[in-house]
Amino acid sequence: MEALFECTLQMIIGNFEDFPEVRIQFFSLLQSIISNQHCFMALFSIPQEHQKLVVDSVAYAIKHTERNVADMGLDIMFELLQNVARTPQFAQVFYQNFLLSLVQDVLYVMTDRLHKSGFKMHATLLRTLFHVVESGQVTAPLFDPATTAAGTTNQQFMRDHIGNLLITSFPNLTQNQVIKFVGGLFDRNMDLPTFKTHLRDFLVSLKEFEGDDGGNQGLYDEERQQELQQQQQQETARRQAVGGLLNPYEVPDDMADL
């Protein structure tokens, strides 16, 4: 593991351009390991520093400027979190070691205009990470009990941690904006579409995408694609209703024999 991951990471982390063929193959291998249940379980039998190499590799992938690599990284991270949740005997150690850093990594790419095409997966990942804490599934402390006030819960600690992170990273935000945004992150009553709207409103308030080509429109790619697909389906249905309007290659298979 060390011979493979550490040396390969050293080759590719200097920039996002060198060894493009190695990058794709490396992350494809990583995805195969994460998605295979037997290989995934083996990750917890290796030393913690080697586990960190795996998680660092995923974090590096989601920050990549090549969209196919970044998208692959987001998919790998989602599979990783799903497998962790299904493996309770290892989940608490994983959350304790990596949950905070993964949250910061996803927040980083979500607020980076170069990665706005991945917004749907950013929202999916963040909702998963925050809700697993809010629901009490993370029982191991995410903080150092020796330096934290007695009685602190993971939920309280995460709220304070994310709030401080946002204030530090975006000094233009007001305290009220941060409190409202952080509260929404932990709202388990929000379904994914509502959660995405909450994130969009926050990104618009940051004005991070102003001046970028397309502005904030990249945050609505999924909805625009769905709307276009619905329009196409409606137009096809209209033409089907009138005989002779459809070209032969447009006729659905179930109508071909009519």
Image (cartoon, helix red, strand yellow):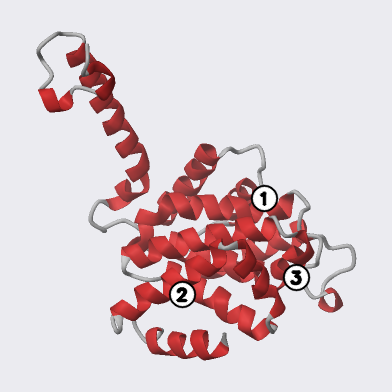
Q: Which residue is mark 2?
A: 60
Q: Which residue is mark 1?
A: 131
Q: Residues within 10 Å of mark 3 (few under 14, many from 20)?
A: some
* SS assignment at label 1: helix
The N terminus is located in which quarter?
bottom right
- For marks 2 and 1, give the CA distance: 24 Å
Is residue 195 visible to the viewer in this orientation of the structure? yes
Q: Which residue is mark 3?
A: 93
* SS assignment at label 3: helix
Q: Residue at x 44, y 67 (%)?
A: 62
Query: Which three-letter amino acid code belongs to the residue tagged 1?
Result: His
Q: Residues within 10 Å of mark 1 (few under 14, many from 20)?
A: some
Q: Can you tell which of label 3 and label 1 is closer to the viewer?
A: 3
- Which comes before the other along the chain, label 3 or label 1? 3
- For marks 3 and 1, give the CA distance: 18 Å
Query: Which three-letter amino acid code belongs to the residue tagged 3?
Result: Val
Q: Can you tell which of label 2 and label 1 is closer to the viewer?
A: 2
> Residue 126: horizontal and vertical position, in percent?
56, 55
Judge from the rendering whether residue 96 lies leftward or rightward of residue 227; answer left or right.
right
